[in-house]
Each structure stands twice: as C-alpha cells, then as structure tokens.
Image (cartoon, helix red, strand yellow):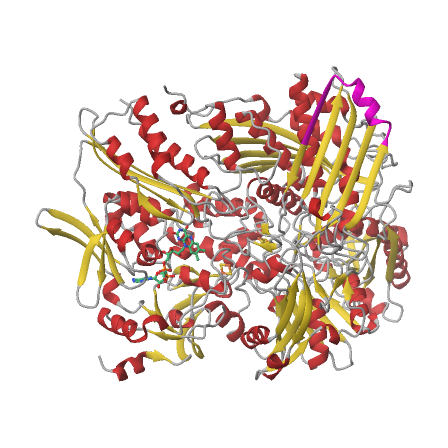
Amino acid sequence: MADNKIAEKSSSSLIKISLIVNEQPRELVVDATMRLVDILREELQLTGTKISCGIGRCGVCSVMMDGKLVNSCLVRAYQANGKEIITIEGLGENGLHPIQKVFLEEGAFQCGYCTPGMIMAVKAMFDQYTHPTEEQILEGLSGNLCRCTGYGGIIRAVQKLSQS
Amino acid sequence: MRVLAAKVWTPTDIEEAWSLRKKFHLESCFVAGGTLLQTQWEKGVSYPPQLISLEKVEELERMNYKTEGAKRFLQIGSMTKLATCRNHPVIKEKWSLLSTAIQQIAAPAIRNLGTIGGNVVYGFGDAIPALLALDAEVSYFDGKTIKIEKLDHWLNTRQNNEVLLTGVILPEYRHSSFVTQFYKKVGRREAFSGSVVTVSGVIGQNDAGIIDFVRLAVGGGDNRPQRLKETEQLLIGQMIKPLLLKNVYDTILNEFHPISDVFYSGDYRRWTAANIVISELSRLEG
Amino acid sequence: MNMNFSYSSNLQSSFIRPDGVDKVTGNLKFLTDLSFPNMLYGKILRSAYPHAKIISISTKKAEELPGVKAVITSKDVPGLNRFGLIFPDQPVLCDERVRYVGDAVAAVAAETEEIAEKALQLIEVEYEPLPVIDDPEKALLPSAPRLHPDGNILHQASYQKGDVEEAFRTCDCIVEETYELPRQMHAYMETEGGVIVPEKDGRITVYVGTQHGYKDRFQLARILAIPESKIRVVSSPMGGSFGGKDELNIQPYGALLAIKTGCPVKIHQSRRESVRSGLKRHPMKITMKTGANRSGKIVAHQVRIIADTGAYATLGPAVLDFAVEHATGPYIIPNVYVEGLSVYTNNGVAGEFRGFGGNQVTFALEGQMDRLAVELGMCPMELRKRNLRKADDLGPVGQEIAPTDGAAQVLKAISQSPLLSEREQSTNPWTKTGVGVAIAMHGGGLGFGRLDPAGGRLSLNKDGKIEIAFGFEEFGQGLLSVIERLVIKEIGCSANDVKITIGDTDHVPRSGSSTASRGTSMVWHALQRMKIPFTQRLLEKASQYTGVPVDRLYLGPIGIWCRHKSDSELLITYKQMADETKDDPIQIETEFHFPTTPHSIPGGHYLYSFAACAAKVEVDVLTGIVRVKHLEQAVAAGPVIYPTGYLGQIEGGSVMALGYTLLEEAVMEKGKYVTENFDSYLIPTINDIPLSMDITAIEELWEGDSYGPRGVGEIGTVAVAPAIAKAVYDAIGLWVTKLPLSREEIVKAVNRRELRKWLTTK
Ligand SMILES: Cc1cc2nc3c(=O)[nH]c(=O)nc-3n(C[C@H](O)[C@H](O)[C@H](O)COP(=O)(O)OP(=O)(O)OC[C@H]3O[C@@H](n4cnc5c(N)ncnc54)[C@H](O)[C@@H]3O)c2cc1C
Ligand code: FES
Ligand code: FES
C-alpha cells in the first residue's frame, strides 16, 4: 500500500468531526483524541453531563451514542465522529421526561451530581425493557455510582415508572 | 488524559491495519474500544504516538455461525462489542457461559464500547476463563494469512502485541449425556469491579455419572487465566465421591499459585478457587 | 430477592425540592460547570514524596512554555502561607519541607488544561527524601523524626470518672479487644473545584464549594493579605461534601493565580488529584476493656484511642474530642477512663467526615457490648437496656444535656423488628445467615467552648417575596427544602412566595458552618426567633394601609388575608406590601449561638440524636463474601421537617456506612495512596446495597424540650458497622475487629471451624 494513502487517512492532531447532539447537527474542529465529555462540556457548553473519575468507573458522564449508553469520558472525538449523541439536556426538551418526573417525586437524588448520568442510564434501561425486572434494574444501573442517596430513592423511582 | 499527543489512524481493512502497524512498529498500538487503554492512559502510563484504531475495519465486526464438515462453530469478529456478544441469541442459546461471563464484565455502558478482542488481547479479561472452559480458538493475522489456534495455546505462547487478533471461535462441543457448566467471578464488590478470582468449568458425564470430559479454568487479579489440567486429569473417568472432592481440593491448591496484591493474598485466591470448584462438583455427587 | 425500600408513614411526602427541576434537567450549574470570558485553567503540583526536604524549585522552563500565564510558589503568597480550620499549620505552598503526597509545591495558570498539565511536568523540584512515618504508633517512638515543631502529637484528650482499676477487680466478666478502623474517603461525586474571578472593582469572587463560606473568606484574606471585604465567596451548590470540603482545598491556588494574572482561573481537580490531596476519615486503633458484674451491669470501661491524623491539623483535635466524648455512648457506666491521642504521620490528611469520630468509637463500644453479652450469656438487647441512660441522666462526659430518652426509644423500636424474631435458615448449603443490632448516640453542633454562632435574616424584598437568607450551603442534604418547608409552616405563606438565599457572603448573614448536623436545627431556631417580629411588623403595616385591625389579619399564600366570620379573603398581596414599604423595608435579623451545655467541658454537646440499626447478613462460606440482605434503622432526632430529605440522609448514610464496613479503604503504602481512583477505591454500587431496607423516624421529644428538630446528616452512618459485624458473628462465630471486614479472615475462620465437609473428609 502506498504511503500517501496512509497519509490521507491519518489525522493530524486536529480533525473535523460532525455529530448530531440533541437533534442538532454540529461540526467542530477538535483534537482527534479529545474526550467526548470535554467536547460536550467545553466546546458545546452542555455542562449537564458531568465528569468525576475519567476512567469509566462512575457513570456521571453517561450519554447516549447512536442509541446506546456510553461513558463520554471513554469516547474520543474520532470515535464520536458521525454519531448521534443525546445528553441530559436533550431529554426534557418538551417539558419533563417521565424519568425526570419520578426522580423528582421519589427523592432519587440529593446533590444531583450523579443525576444526569443516572437518568441516562435509566433511559437506556427503559429503552431496552419496558418493565425491567429486579435483575435488569441492578444490571442496568450497576455502572452509575451515587454517593448521596444509597440508591433507595432511585430504585423507588424506577419501580414507580415500571409500574406506570 | 484529556487529549493525547498522538495521531489516530483509521484503516478500513486488515491489510491496511497491519501495514500501519509494521510501518510504525513500536511507535504504535492497536486501539479497539479503547476502554482498557483509557484506564491506563489516565494513570499516566505512556502511550505510543501513533494509534491505529480498528473501529473502521468492518470485517472484524462480523459474526458467522458456520458448519465445516462435521464441525459447527461460531466465529466472532474481534471488534464485536461485549454488549453484542452478551445479548446475541446464538451465544445465549449455545454458549450461554460466555454470555454469563460477559454480563459480569464492567457495566452496560462500558460493554457498549469494549470489545471481545480487547478483552482477550488484554490477557487478563474476564471472558478468558469462560472461553478456555469452552475450548475456544482465536484467529489472528500474522502479516500473510489468518491463522487459527487454540486460545489456551495462544495465551501461553503468544508474543505480546505482535499480532492482530481477528476473532474468537467457539466450537460446538461433543455432547455427553449430562453437561454442567459454571462461571463464577469473585470481585472486590458485588458488581462492577475487577476480578479477584474467576473460575469457570464445563463438565460432561455419561449415563452412568462418569465424567467423560472436563475443562476447568481460573484467573483473577494479576493472574493469567489458566486451565487446571492436573485437576482435569484427576477427574476424567471418575464419579464424584467425597474422597475425590478432597483430592480435587488438594490438587487445585497444588497447581494454582496465584500472586497476591494489597487487597487479597494468593492463598485467599487459591482457597476460593478450590472451594468454588468443589461446590460445583459436589452438585454432581452420585 | 424482593426489593423493598420502606419507611415509617411520617417520612412519606410529595414535596418537590426547590432545586429539583434544575437537577434532573441538568440545568443546574455547579460551580465547576462555570466558565467566564478569558478564563485560564489552573493546576497544582503536589509533592512527589510523602516526606522530604525541598532543596530547590525551578519554574523557569514552565514559565517559558507558550500559553502559560503564571507559575506560583511559596514566594508568591503575600500573607500567611498557612491554613487550617482550628489552627493554621498547613502550608499553602511548601517552601522547605513536604509532609504528605498532597502537599502543594507550585501551581500554574495556562490557556488550556493541557498546557497547564505540561507546565507542571516542566517544574523542577529537587527533594531530599526524609524517613516516612506511615503509622501513628511509629510516630510516637522517641526515635521518630518530628513532623512539627511541637512533636508528633497533635492533640491529647481524656475523660475520667471513678476508678477503673479498682472497679475491674470487682467485675465478674471482662472483655478486652483492639479495633482497627480504616481511612475512608468521602468520595463526593463532584471533585473539588470552581472558578476565581478578579472583579473590576478590585475584589475577587470565589465560586468554589465549601461548607462555610465566611470561614473560607477569613482564611483566604489571611493568605492573600487583603481585607475580607474584598472577597466574595459563592459556595453553593455542591456535588456532595460529607465534611470533606469544609477545609480549604483549591481556593488559595485559584485566588493567587487569578490575582497574579488578572484573569478568571478555573481549577477542577481530577479524581486522582482529589484522592491525593483530599481529606479522609481518621483511621483509628481503639483498645477497650470493659467489665461487668453477673447481672449485666457494666461497672468499668477503659478506652485508648490512637488516631492517625496525617500531616496537618485541620479539625483533627475536634474529631478526637468527639471520639473521646462518645466512648461510652448512651450507657451509664460508673467507672470510666478514656484517653485519646491524635498523631501526626505522613499519611494523607484526616479531618472532618460525617460522623466525626463517632463511627469509629461506636464500632468498638458496640463490639464490646456484644462480646460482653455472649460472655455473660445474656441477650444483647437486654444488656444494653440494663445500662442505658435515662432521660435526665447527665451526658457521656458528665455534662448537663437536654433531657432525652432517645436511646430507649430507638432500642425499643428496633426490638420490634421482625428480623430479630424470624430465623429462617438459608436454603443454600454454602451460606450462613446472621442478625445483629447496634445503637448509637450522636452530639449535634460543635460543642462547648467552640465558636458556634448561627443566624439568619428574614425580609420582605422589593419583588414582594419573603426572602430568607442563611450563610449555609446546599450540598445535597436538602437544606433548601428544609428552609422552604419551615418558612411555609412558620409564616403561613406558600412556596411561591418564598425566596431563599444561601451560600454567598455578599448576600447572606453569618450562620456558622453547614456541618455537625446543625443546619436544620439552626434554621428552625432562627425562624423561631424571627417569625413573630417579622409577622407582627408585616401585619401592623398591613393594618395601617388597609385600616383592618391587626387581630383580624394573618399571613397566607400570596399575601395578607383578612378573617371574616365564616371565610377569609386576600386583602393585600406581598408585592403590594413591598411597594408600600419600600422606604422602610421589613427586615428581621437574628444572631445566636448553638445551644451548648452549661458545663465547661470542651467539646461537650448538649443536643443528641440516636439511632438503632438491625442488619441481616448472608455469609458465603466459599468466598467469605458478606451480603447485607436487610437493614433497618430507627432514628430519634425530633420532628421531621423535610421527609424525603430525612429518609435520604438515613438511607444514604446507611449505604455509606455499609461501604465503610465491607469495602472502603484508602490504602496507603509508605505514605502513598494505592487506591487512586474509583477502580480501586470501591464504594457501594446499586448491587451492594441491602435490597430491603426500612427506616423509622421517631419524632417525639422529651416533655418540655424546646429545641426542635435535630439534624440527621450524620446519625444514620453510626450504628450500621457494629450491627453488621455482630450479624457476621451470629452467622459464623467470627468476631470482627477490623474494617473493612476481611473476606480472607472469614475464609480462614471457616477453614478453621471446618464448616466445609470436604476439609474433614478422611
Ligand atoms: C470501567 C471499566 C471496567 C472494566 N471492567 C472490566 C471487567 O470487569 N472485566 C474485564 O475483563 N475487563 C474490564 N475492563 C477492561 C476492558 O474494558 C475490557 O477488558 C474490554 O474488553 C477491552 O476491550 P477494548 O475494545 O476496550 O480494548 P482496548 O482498550 O481498545 O484494547 C486493549 C488492549 O488490546 C489491544 N487490542 C485490542 N484489540 C486488538 C486486536 N484486535 N488485535 C490486537 N490487539 C488488540 C490493544 O492494543 C490494547 O493493548 C474494564 C474497563 C473499564 C474502563
Ligand atoms: S467520569 Fe466517565 S465514568 Fe466517571
Ligand atoms: S445525588 Fe449526590 S451522588 Fe447521587
């Protein structure tokens, strides 16, 4: 294979990426290895997505990418290129989403720092199962840490939504 | 690391990926989902200036359920996401042990990014004990052709990072009258933690209750997953009896010498591995 | 499995918290979410060694890196190069010596975080490593190097009553044990950070979370050598704190860099940086010797506490005092000797953490009670009952306290738990189940002799809102809801009429710190003081304008209402009243002190809350894994103000304590953290919690108690660990002395006890 083909496909550090964020097309020139979480928070000022561990171990940065839950601290710009992203800001655009409502009603948060990621994880779970079983709830939320609530309120909220 | 001082290459076929790797050699590494690598980068582990992403190599993401002669097997492309493997209907039906194992790797969001190939090349991945118990094979590209060999053999002989893993192959194994299988991962907490000890096994018994095949594998922590071959030898042709269990216990303690870390000692891992194997075998007591 | 998170009916509610909608939509701006034009990014260089002499620091290369705007070292600190809540002994930037891996040596402001990070690598620091003291007992050896001019003992505290030596001679039964408690990390999800902005008028605004904005302002003024009036601290909201953000963290560096560059500077620590520099719970080694007579009356109790306080003081002395005070808990023991030592080491810095020394000492105390009960062949509940304090007994260090029978209330409530009677055996041959109970007593407020002022302001603002202002912070505990609920209840208006102002030193009165379970209590006290004068003034004015006599008027939703014979009508809105009174606005302020004991016992508390916990565990004998299947808590802390918040504090506190018991330890080896992020420092996930929990709130106070609600921020964390430990004993006969509970020890114990039959097969 000719070297020039390789050159074509290499990205100098900066690349142009296009992605759809909360239904809006966006084009950005960023470093190819910039983390999606930083693109969202710093380039797009979507600070609803949080950052805490930076290694996929807490879930506060969870967003949907092409309909699947991912940790935005583990996704780099080149991986997000061409993808459709939904963040917490994209959830309740027409009033509160039912998940947001039950979170409010059942005390599913305190400080609220885990909440955007937790809500995205709950959404991903309900996208997969309309009435998640206990096992499905425990598996679905296993990657999202909450230090404040002890998860009681979160489980009450999910159970309520599942029954409705 | 928020931004890496590295170039990203996105080859679209295996040959191209390989030639990039050859060109940059030690200055490069393959990146699959990048989940394991991110954990290392964030710790400040150094990384090469050329990153070769395999995400655009479509042929690595295929899954084929095939028959060749009398052999029936499933080929899983190395870039198949862990989540896809976990939920795949054929895997759930025929190789549920793998699905069970993957369910205990990380959490759903990470399984949407991490790949089966990454887990295997990592060398300590939690899928490996299950794959060993299933007698899985791996396929890799050596620059010329795609080679296939037993995972067990490959793990013990491979040169680090010198290959491009193309897939994992699950053979349909011979059916005894009764087949029992298990996968137990003991993490530091109930879910979403690295493994302290992982034990997996597939055991077949004939109508008389005699064990006619058995594969046992252990891993966990910084211990390379391995088959428990002496224990397997001991079990073959036997019926489960209390005295045999006692011997199995001692044999496992003899052949499994895991290393310690600040959280758990090697002894704890040995005892636990032996206890789990025995508890599973004791269900088959005849 | 059957998930069920139940609670007593008084914890049911449907209020939506004032900050709720913004939190679930992601619209709420945490202070680490802020950005400003021309903002720079700051990074702090921490020590490479746990203990070393600094020979030289060269910042030249870092300064030359394009994009770097400022590099600071100790030379750039204009004022006192020290901080600390009790006394300032921690260098802002070290000049001669570093004493732990979190010590700051230099800091950088640059155009991007990446450049700042690169600049840190270019700062050349030459160290001469010194011997590392990684254990408090080593620090006490005469040969140990001195970490501070006065030696290695930060603080000593003791309490004595009667004569223990003499009393032990009369005991029929004595148990002695040493308990070891781990270094727990707060693990608030939002790491330390925020933005410091230099303002046009020469002031600076510090947008950084803390638990006491005024205290930060005081400490920062001292460091920056500028008057406090030139500093505005905006300290809310915060993504969790649990005590960990009470002390200064990144504020001084951000402020120094902002002043030096004239630009806003943002610092948001990575988790790794947070682990390295942040406070932790004090590891403690506690030896207790407790003696009783045959009838189960405890006659002597001797306690020695050694706390590893790490490199600097922060609140270490107060934590030790608290542990000493709570060493007898809710029990009345005639002969007591407690001594405590808080010792400097090169391990991290230990400071304030939810429970404040009570968790450690209660684990030991309740362990003693359970061991005594077994030795005496007595029901552990009965043993506790026989030694329990009565409502008007003195407090644990002989001080007068507000009479309370909370201890008896919670013990009685937990005795009725179905866990204690049902004894179903598990069907799995490899698991053993067990049940344990423990109780706890916890003081609120800072205690005698500590400046503990509180205050608030209530006004009708120009927009016609009833504005209530406190110098407290919201870090998730639900303070805003507490304030809103109380204002509605005490004033009679509706939620829409209320504006709450907190966490901004330019706009709030001094209220003291948002710590020590004092927030709810102080809001209630402040409102008790302000509501009558405020209501009276408002009604008088309303009467003047409307001509309706005051006795027919009352405050209600939207405005002031007039009572008729059978109904009432809205007479004048708050907005109208605000317009009418704009020349003479109605504003009431109050200042007071947290209630303390009249006895001059340093740190002695006056108000206490109580909890009892029952835990049911399943021990897997193959792996040593302990699973808490069910957990119940009964809490006596006075009236419930915000039910969801109360419940959340107890549930959340229970799970945090479960983590403390089963999982959590910030492991250090030779003064360096081994657990540097959430991959190795493990807190409970949703899979680790008991899937069935039940929380009961006991609201009834002792007759004549006029002190209202006590806070519940801490009490839910205290009784959990000893209850789980007892349940493990109940299951497999192993007495746990060390947390987090070791699976290895359990497997060994099981091996020894030959609970597995293949070990005994011949
Ligand atoms: C939060 C978190 C939790 C985790 N929990 C677990 C767990 O419970 N159990 C577990 O086993 N793992 C766990 N991991 C590790 C890791 O995510 C998985 O092992 C995953 O399968 C790795 O796949 P990846 O595609 O992300 O690999 P990458 O990170 O992309 O690569 C891993 C390594 O394999 C090499 N590599 C990848 N693909 C190929 C290929 N086709 N050919 C040659 N070399 C290749 C890479 O160069 C790299 O050295 C966890 C990771 C994270 C971040
Ligand atoms: S910040 Fe991404 S998982 Fe923690
Ligand atoms: S609400 Fe604070 S971490 Fe979940």
At horizontal 52% and vertical 47% (from top left) the residue drawn is: B262
Residue with the most extreme front position: C143
At horizontal 33% and vertical 33% (from top left) the residue drawn is: B251
Residue C742 in the image: above or below residue C276: above
At horizontal 80% and vertical 50% (from top left) the residue drawn is: C522
Q: Quadrant of ligand 1?
A: bottom left
Residue A12 coordinates in the image, percent (x, y): 39, 81
- The magenta-colored residue range is C161-177
Judge from the rendering whether residue C565 lies leftward or rightward of residue C251; answer left or right: right
Residue with the most extreme top position: C294
Magenta span contains residue B146: no
As rendered, which of C161 and C493 lies closer to the eye? C161
As rendered, which of C396 and B19 lies closer to the eye? B19
Residue A128 coordinates in the image, percent (x, y): 37, 52
Quarter of the image with the C terminus of chain C is top left
Residue C549 in the image: above or below residue C64: above
Magenta span contains residue C166: yes
Quarter of the image with the N terminus of chain C is top left
- Visible in this render: residue C716? yes
Residue A133 coordinates in the image, percent (x, y): 41, 42
As rendered, which of C91 and B17 lies closer to the eye? C91
As rendered, which of C34 and C361 lies closer to the eye? C361
In terms of image quadrants, where is residue C388?
Answer: top right
Q: Number of callouts in the render? A: 0
Judge from the rendering whether residue C556 lies leftward or rightward of residue A61; answer left or right: right
- Visible in this render: residue C627? no
Residue B43 coordinates in the image, percent (x, y): 50, 62
In terms of image quadrants, where is residue C570?
Answer: bottom right
